[in-house]
Image (cartoon, grey):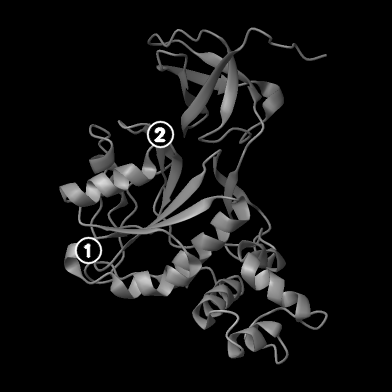
Amino acid sequence: MRPAHRNATPGMVTAVDRGRYTCVVGDDERIVVAITARELGRKAVVVGDRVDLVGDVSGQEGSLARIVRVHPRTSVLRRTADDDDPVERVIVANASHLMIVTSIADPEPRPRLIDRCLVAAYDAGMTPLLCLTKSDLGDPAELRRRYAPLDVPTVATSLDDDARAELQGTLRDRTTVLVGHSGVGKSTLVNSLVPGSDRAIGEVNVVTGRGRHTSSSAVALQLPQGGWVIDTPGIRSFGLAHVDPGAFIEAFPDLAAETERCPRGCTHSSAESECALDDAVAERRLDGERVESYRRLLASRERQSGD
């Protein structure tokens, strides 16, 4: 029979490094390093998890506590290596928002990767946000237009005072995961939002147009104005093998109502000849761009994850 650990101390996991879990604990928000109890198994705890700890939770140098319990998660952001990989990787837990960071230029935006991150957000029950960095290098209007039909909140920033204040207001009192491919300015953004965080900043290869990885694991950082941001390593692909394409329509309740008129077995893709979504657009009951956006997300599940 496992011990109840009724006097365990609650905490939140902010970083994971080679079997050591950094946690923030108590009203004084002290930092405690812990290992996991054997019964939890390896990889059972991720950044963002709410946990219970026993042992030395003083936070003193050299002390080590033990995580004995993981609380039920309110959300789980997952991805696979590619669309054929059955192994899911949990990135973070208990985040309410997913902020997809992409640059206007240097490197060029990758809409297919953005679409895939949106699918993952909808699957996890998280609210997506789109942050367009380096807006001083180009016009964000096209990306804004592309995602407007999905009602995805979008902020463009060159990290001037006004843009920073807008973004801080958006993130206040939320737990937000930041994802984006390397070189888009994610670490620069985090350093601006959380002074003293000292996230390593990478450069973009002038030949390939890609950035180099500067973060090796996710880390949660507390915002001065309240809330948390969870910085994640730069990604080059976002596999969606764990996502059922049939569930995508749940993120579009206005479209879902129209699909009740579809013939049995309709996938609602652009290849369907009798999809009720086409009739609804023709009769102006639905916005054609919104249907196109939904179908783009649907198609992204079928594309290679390296697109």
Mark 2 closeness class: few <14, some 14–19, many ≥20 residues within 10 Å: some
Q: Residue at x 47, y 23 (%)?
A: 23
Question: How far across and how far down the image is residue 107, in percent?
Answer: 28, 67
Q: Is residue 254 left or right of residue 121?
A: right
- Please indicate whether residue 56 sits to the left or right of residue 40 in the image: left
Numbered mark located on residue 227 in the image: 2
Amino acid type at circle 1 is Ser
Q: From the viewer's perspective, is 142 left or right of 49?
A: left
Q: Residue 90: horizontal and vertical position, in percent? A: 58, 45
Say few, some or many: other residues with alpha carbon within 10 Å of mark 1 (under 14 / 14 to 19 / 20 or more).
some
Which label was assigned to residue 135? 1
- Whole-percent x and y of residue 108? 30, 71
Marks 2 and 1 close (CB-CB < 8 Å): no
Using the rendered image of the protein, determine whether residue 80 is visible from the camera's viewpoint. no
Q: Amino acid at mark 2?
A: Gly
Q: Nearer the viewer, residue 217 or 145?
A: 145
